[in-house]
Every structure is written in C-alpha cells, then in structure tokens.
Amino acid sequence: MREDKGIFYRIDWVVVGLYLTLVFIGWLNIYAAVYNDTHNQIADLSQKYGKQMIFILAAILLAMGILIIDPKFFSQFAWFIYGFFLFMLVIVIFSGREVAGSKGWFAIGGFGIQPAEFAKMATVLALAKYLGTLDVSLAKFRSLVIASAIILVPALVVFLQHDTGSAIVFLTLVIVLYRAGLTGFVPLAFIVLPVLGILALVLPKVVLVAVLLMAAGGFYFFSNRKLRTNLLIIAAFMGALGFVFSVDYSVNHILEPHQRNRIHVLLGQDVDLRGAGYNVNQSLIAIGSGKFFGKGFLQGTQTKYNFVPEQSTDFIFCTVGEEWGFLGSAVLVILYMGLFIRLILMAERQRSRFSRLYGYGVASILFFHFAINIGMTLGLVPVIGIPLPYVSYGGSSLWAFTVLLFIFIRQDSYHYELV
Amino acid sequence: MERIYADRKYIIIGFFLLIGIVYLARLFYVQILVDKYILSANNNVLRYVTQYPARGLVFDRNGKLLVYNEAAYDLMVIPRQVKNPDTMALCHLLGIDREEFLNRMEKASSYSTYRPSIFEAQITRDNYGFLEEKLFLFPGFYVQSRTLRKYTYKVAAHSFGYIGEASPEVIEKNSYYRPGDYIGINGIEKSYEDILRGKKGMKIRVFDVLNRDKGSFRDGRYDTTSVAGTNLYSSIDAELQEYGELLMTNKKGSIVAIEPQTGEILCIITSPSYDPNLLAGNIRRKNYTKLLQDTVYMPLFNRALMAMYPPGSTFKLVDALVGQQEGVLFPETRYGCQGGFPLGNGKKVGCHPHPSPLDLVGAIQISCNAYFCRVFKSIIDKSSYSSTRQAYESWRKEVMSFGFGKKLGIDIPGELNGNIPSPSYYDKYHGLNRWRSMTIISLAIGQGEIGITPMQLANQAALISNRGWYYTPHVIRAIGRKDSLNEAYNVKHKVLVDERYFEVVIEGMADVVTGGTGRVAQLDSIVICGKTGTAQNPHGKNHSLFIAFAPRNNAKIAISVVVENAGTGALWAAPIASLMIEKYLNRTVKRKELEERMVSGNLINGKQPESERGQGNILPD
C-alpha cells in the first residue's frame, strides 16, 4: 500500500513549516551578522551568508532524500549507522583537523565535516532501536547498563576530541530514558545537581552545609520515619555533601582554565571583560540594546563592530536580539517551543516504540541545544560552544539537525501503520 | 507496560515550557526592564583603547641616559566604521596619494573589518596636533598614542638592538601581543623584552556614530591601567663606547672590554656600525633594508659576537696555561728555534728572528711559534694518554673551559659558538684516528679550524687577569634599581687550569708590552699585560689582534681588539687597545698623536695607511 504515494505523502507540514521558518530566520541573521557594504550580494560565496545558502539548499535535498527512503530502513540499519559514526568519531581523533581547539573535523575540500554532529542522530537511532526491542525494560539492571552505554560511549569519544560541549549534549538523552520508564530520580538529579553545584561555588560552605542539614531535617520531619526512608535521607544527605565538596575541588583543580573562567564569569565572580567575560557581556549589550522593537534589519551595531568571531555561529541569537528586539526574540523562542511540543505530540502518536522514542530523542537533542545556546547568550548558562539548531551558521550542524528531524518526519508519515 | 509512562509527556512538556518561559522572562528583563545593557539609542559603539606603557629606560654605568622614549601617535582605522570619508582631505593630511590610501584600506580590511589596524604609524607630535583637529571628519579613524625609542648617544647600535611590530608568528605564540604591538627584535630590547615592555592597560570608551568620544564605559569600572616598563642599568660606559667607535672609524673589526671582576661589559664596538636612531620609528623599515643591502660595510653584522676569527698568537697564552696544567711545561722549560718549527717533510711553521733558546716568559714576550708548537705537541703526545684522540679530547675540554667553542651566554642575542674542532671533525677530514699531533699543529699558534669571537677573546683576557675564573659577560648590571644585581650573571665559572699557573703567563704578557711584540701599547703610569695576534685568513691581509688587561693586579679592564685585514697585531689592534685602556682608566687620553693616527687610519677603502711606515721597532709575531 506504500507505492506511488510520493515523497510528501502524509508528512507533518507543521513541523516542516517550523523547520523552514527557522532555517530562513537563521540565514537572515547570518546575513545581518556578517553584512558589510562591500559585499552585499546575497549569493556571494566568499561570505558566510552565501555559503549558508548553499548549505541550506543541500540540506533541503538531503531532507527530500530521506523522505524517499523506506522508513523501515532506519530501524533496521540503526546499529549499522551507530557503528559507522562511532567509527568515524574515533578516526577523526587521529586524522581530523583541529578547529578552535577540538580535533573533531574532517576536512573535505574547503569544508569541514564534524562527525560528532551526526553521531547524535546515530545515537538516538540506536537508543530507540534498543529500547524498542520487546524484552528490554529499564527496570532491569542489564538493560539500563546497555542503554547507558549506548549514550555514554560516543559521548566519551567526543569528549576525548576536546569537544566538551558536544559531549554534554548526549546526556540530554536521559529524557528518552525517562520516557521509556527510567525512574524519575535520575532526570531529577540532572536538574538538582547542577543547581547544587552552582550553590557550592557561590555560597560559603558553612551556609550550604546548614541548608543541606535543614533540608534533610525537613525530609525526615515529613517522612514516614521508617528505617529504609531514614537511611535514604542520610544517604542523600551524605551524597549531596560529597558532591558539594567535589564540585569545588574539580572546578579549581580539574577543569581547564578557560572552562573555569567561564564558570566564574557566569557566577559574576569575574569581570575581566577582555577575557572570559567578554563574550557574554558583549552578548548582553547587543541583546539589551535591541529593546522592544529592535534596531531593525541590518541596523545592528554591536554585533557588527566589536563582536567576537562566533557571532554567526554560537552567538547568532545576539543578532536576533539586537535587530529584532524583544518581539523578534520572543517569536523565535516561541517557534522553538512550538517545534518541541509538536515533536512530542507527534512522538506520542507513534505506534511503534522505536519511532516514539526516536521522536523524544529528536526533541531532547534540539531542546538541549536551544536551552544551552540561548541560555549562554543570555548569561544564564556557562559559555558552551554548541550551535543553535537550524539558525547558526555551519554546514555540519545544519545537515545533521536536518537528517535528525527528517528521519522522524519520515517515521511519522507512516505512524498509522504498525511498523 | 509502556502505557504506564504516557503521562510523563506532560512532565517533559512542562519542563520544556518552563525553560522557555524563564528565557522569555530573562529577555524581557534584559531588553526592557533594565537599561544596564543599553548603551544608547544612537548606535554607540565601544572601543577598546589599549594603553601602551612607556618602555623601560636604559642607563649607562655612570648613570647617563642611553635609551629613552618620545611620544608618537599611530593613526588607527576600523574599516567597518569608515563612512564616506573625504579621501582627498585625509590623503592631504598624511601626505599620501589616493592609491596608497586604497592600498592601506585594503590591507586593514583584509586583517579585520571590525578590529583596528594601524593606518599610519608613529606620527610625530607636531603632525598629530594638526591631524587631531580634523579627525572628527573621518569616522572610523582614531589616534592611539605610542612611544618611540630615542638614543642619546649614537653608539652601541648592535647592543641596544631595536623594536618593531610583533610578527604574526609571535602573535600566534604569545597571547600578550596584538597586531601593531611593539616587541624587542634584537639586542637588549629583545633579551630584556619582558622587563622593558611593562604591562599594557585597556580603556573602554564609548563613541558615537560621529566618532565622538562620549566618555568611559560605565565610569571606567572595567578599565585597567598600564604599568610602565622597568629601567635597565647597563654596564656600558657610554664615553668609552663612543671613543672606541671613533677609533674604529673606517675599519672593520671590533673592540670588547670587560670589567674582569664582575664580567660587566664596558663596551662592545662593532665597526662599521650605524646610528641606532635609524632603526627607531616609522623610518625603520626603509633604513633596515638600506643597511641590509650594504654588502661592503655590512653595518648590521655584529662582529663582536657573530664574527669568528682564528685567534692567532693570542692563543699561545692558552697553550702556556694548558701545557702547565698537563705537566708538560714549566716556567723554566726552554726550546730552541731555528727560524721555525720543522714539520718533517721539509716544511716548517715559520718564525721570525729572535734570541734562542727561550724560556716560557721569553717565548710569550717574543711570541715564538716553534716554542708553542713544541708545547702543543708535548700535550697531545703525552705518554699518559693512550691515544692522540684521548689526549686531544682532554686538551679540548680544558680549552673549552676558557669559554671557547660554545656560547658564553651573554645577554645580547645572536652570539656565535666559535669553534674548537671536535675529534670527529678530524676523523672526517683525515680518516678515523688517522691524525696526529703534527697533523693539527697549527692549533698551537691559533690557526687552522679554530674560531673564536671577539667577545670570547675579551673574556680570555678577563679570566687570565682573574687567574682562572670569569663571570659570564653581560651588558645589563642591574634591573629596576641601580644597586640591585643582575642575578642571572652571578655564577663564577672556573677554568680547568689551576691558579698557580697564571702568574708566569701574566709575567710574559707584561713583558710583551714593556719589551716584546706589543711595545706600542705601553702606557707610562699603568702596567698593561697584553698579547698580540696576527690571524692569517683566506680573505686577504692578516687580521690584527690584541688582547690585554690592566692594571696587572686587580685589573679594572680586560679588552680584545680585532682589526680586520690590517696586518700584525702590533700595527693597529695593540695601539687601539692601549688607547682604550688609557681612556677608561684615566678618563682622558694624553697620547694625541697616536690617537690621531688611529682615528684617521682608513683600512676599508684600500688606501695603505701611513702608520705602516716607520714602525721599525715593532716585532712581527
């Protein structure tokens, strides 16, 4: 029954529309960010907006290519794809090109390809495939270990490429595990621990220990006073205590200096505006100066004159903030929110566990990039150099996010079938 | 069992929405609630103005100012901010044409369109005043104040070195430097760069679209002040340096003088030289090329450190010391000389007529070639060594302890190793171990493959006057405070020859001046100990060499003089050394006639000097 349905058969036009809108907004702002009077041809290939246009056209071809592939292909070849990209990740450590301190790039012609971007998609495929298998249940210890390994192995390899930002992205797949039945304590810990970590760096130790003691006391007061609960509270208290002290130690002794500086900047403990604080401060000035309506297209000054080289990649949101103001920024945030919610609703309507969990994987990866990237430009999250999906300049990330999304759109177009 | 978790979608969606709302709130705060991040509605921009510190000053050993700074101004451009400039007016102000203007804009844009580049470097104070009035007409251009190096004495150019813009390679390696920053490129400017440069500061200013300075950003809260560079106190005696350069007029060669007890360098003269002011400021590039292309005078070539000469007879002092240390030579050892040292095959190392036989003191005084060939042969053929090679290695080690054949480690870049040939060199030349004392006999009289720099020669004189030790020569005696010591040069180097063997050699050196090959160097009031040298070389006439120290005990000055292609050591080097010693110890020179003869001697332009005539009392060596 699948014959002659064409590649646009039953695809979710809402998501495709959101995708195209974001890509267009991205191109517009890349144009604005690198715009100057001498090069103003929109198709000037020596300029980033010219290249991005090529990247976009290629991405659209890529998307159409995926829409004609049999949807079963992706679940059947999930392991193969995963293995392939894992292999590429290892190869790139030895033969890759170094860009901005991380050895994660293949040089192909004049372009760089970053396998780590595609490895995210491969990992989501593999994870969905594994969790979609009938006898797998996260209540079983063995399944939990294997699922974690699927996530952590590529993350570790990417980490070894000195690309800490991309490595952290993999951890967001805990959302998929949570949806697949993992106990809620784990994602909760992912939220509580960073908060605790920040408190550990900001508050004096005595105060923090007192707060933890009070919290433990509070839990005890409201608990059922059974031995098991008491032990749990004591264990949690000790764990939190250990965590607090180890965070302080690792920030000061294990992290590399530039990473430490970024954390200090975030916490307002560093005002070196030429050093680590420069980007964030410049970013806030740019966004802040946009006010409600923004300065208008191509009228931004902060993002042009004094800005960091990453203005078209990691800090593209500054251009949005400056030129389109609160109005434009809010629209962009809402568009992303719409995309994420739509993806989750789509995931929930899947019949197969594979495509449902794959959908959750897509949503969580995109969400994490969104949250870190915009949070960073707003000074809410440490500077971690990861792109804003579909908007940031760059071929690798655009193509990888496109493939990631369209595999799901393809799965979804057959959601009524039992695959 | 899967369905159980379906409501988790609400938690996940809720979490996503929560973050979205937090970000919207933050955006609202940053963009609308506070004006902390709003500079102004007028498209103002921040400009990071580097505060360049004054570079450290350099004083001479008597506290005279040698190197100082003068204010200069760089015209900077930020290409993106340039809006319809009145090109002609600007060209007119700078005295450039339109094409040059476009060239420079192109160059600046290719570096960066939003970061400042230097458009015109080092504008003098006068031109700056003129430019400043009109600057508002040219958005995108501004002036950055800098300093320019100036030199009170037009001497010691090679030792001072020069500064210039840091190269892209340096900027790549060292994050302190930005394009347009200055860095020491040669001389003490290079070796003491970290001390002289100070610390840059940074002012953040707000400028409006009309290029008007609207004041500091947030009341200067993020500004940093610059810290001036630290001053250096040089051991150079400016007057002595100047006098030495005068004596070396129209001669190729060098004079190096050291204070033996401290290793402080009193002067380093390299001739031909140039005025250090030629390599300061925006004229540097042009002048540098000019100096570089002068292949006749080679004014950029620092002969005192980078030229290597066979030491000639000055090396006999080393033979005398090492021979005694090896136990094959005693003060009373006598060797005869029948016009030279026979090499066996009918050839000989020639010697000039002199009384024979001689003891050690006499042999130094007269500079007998045969005597020192025999000393050298007896070292290399000494029976306690199992092979020529072993004996040579031991000899070489002792010779190198004099500071030869390796860099001394002085605080001016570019020093040469010199050369004391390694055994493997002779292996290569003659075949493995197929060389004997007779094969390498020319080393005895400082000829052959041996190469020594003028700096090493002066150090040799210094260590002999100290009876066997030296401090590494250096031109900077104190950093920051005048009375502080340059800690880097506080290590005493011992020569591998015992102190007791020196006195007889020094006796010989005193006799050289009172009644030997260096009589021309005699000075009435002070005992000068010296040794002449005449270095044969394939490039023409012999080099004239002289090393000396004075007074005999507690020497205040040790000196080496090399005059290229000038004949015997006594002809030019010895009198020049003697005048230098007189100048340093007495502060004035009484022997005006000798001085005049030395200054006026022109040995570069081919004319035979007058002084070569009527010098019958000078013995060749």
Image: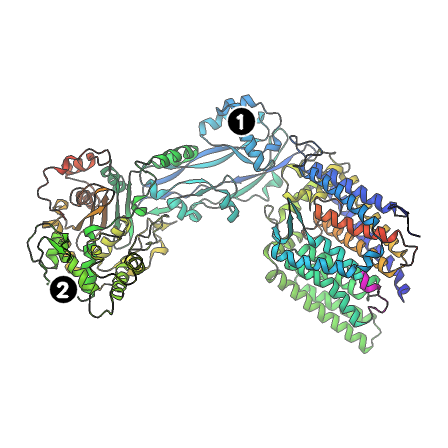
CA neighbours of label 1 inside 10 A, class few (<14), some (14 to 19), many (20+): some
Q: Position of residue A310 (x, y in %)?
A: 65, 44
Left/right of residue B126 with respect to residue A113 in the rendered view:
left
Query: Badge 1 sits on which subunit?
Result: B
Q: Residue furthest left?
A: B355
Q: Position of residue A231 (x, y in %)?
A: 77, 75
Of all chains, the one bearing label 2 is: B
For residue B183, side relative to residue B446 (left or right): right
**Depicted B281 relative to depicted A351: above or below:** above
Helix, strand or loop status at disc 2: loop
What are the residue bounds of the magenta stretch? Answer: A128-138
Name the quadrant of the N terminus of chain B: bottom right
Q: Is residue A202 visible?
A: no
Instruction: Write the residue at 17% across / 40% down.
Output: B589
Which residue carries the number 2 mark? B330
Is the image coloured rainbow, by chain, by secondary structure, or in one colour?
Answer: rainbow
The foreground one among A140 and B276 is: A140
| Residue pointed to by mark 1 | B101
Residue B446 position, x and y percent, is: 22, 53
Q: Secondary structure at mark 1?
A: helix
Spatial CA span between label 1 and label 2: 77 Å
Residue B233 covered by magenta stretch: no
Q: Is residue A131 magenta?
A: yes
Q: Earlier in the sequence, mark 1 or mark 2?
A: 1
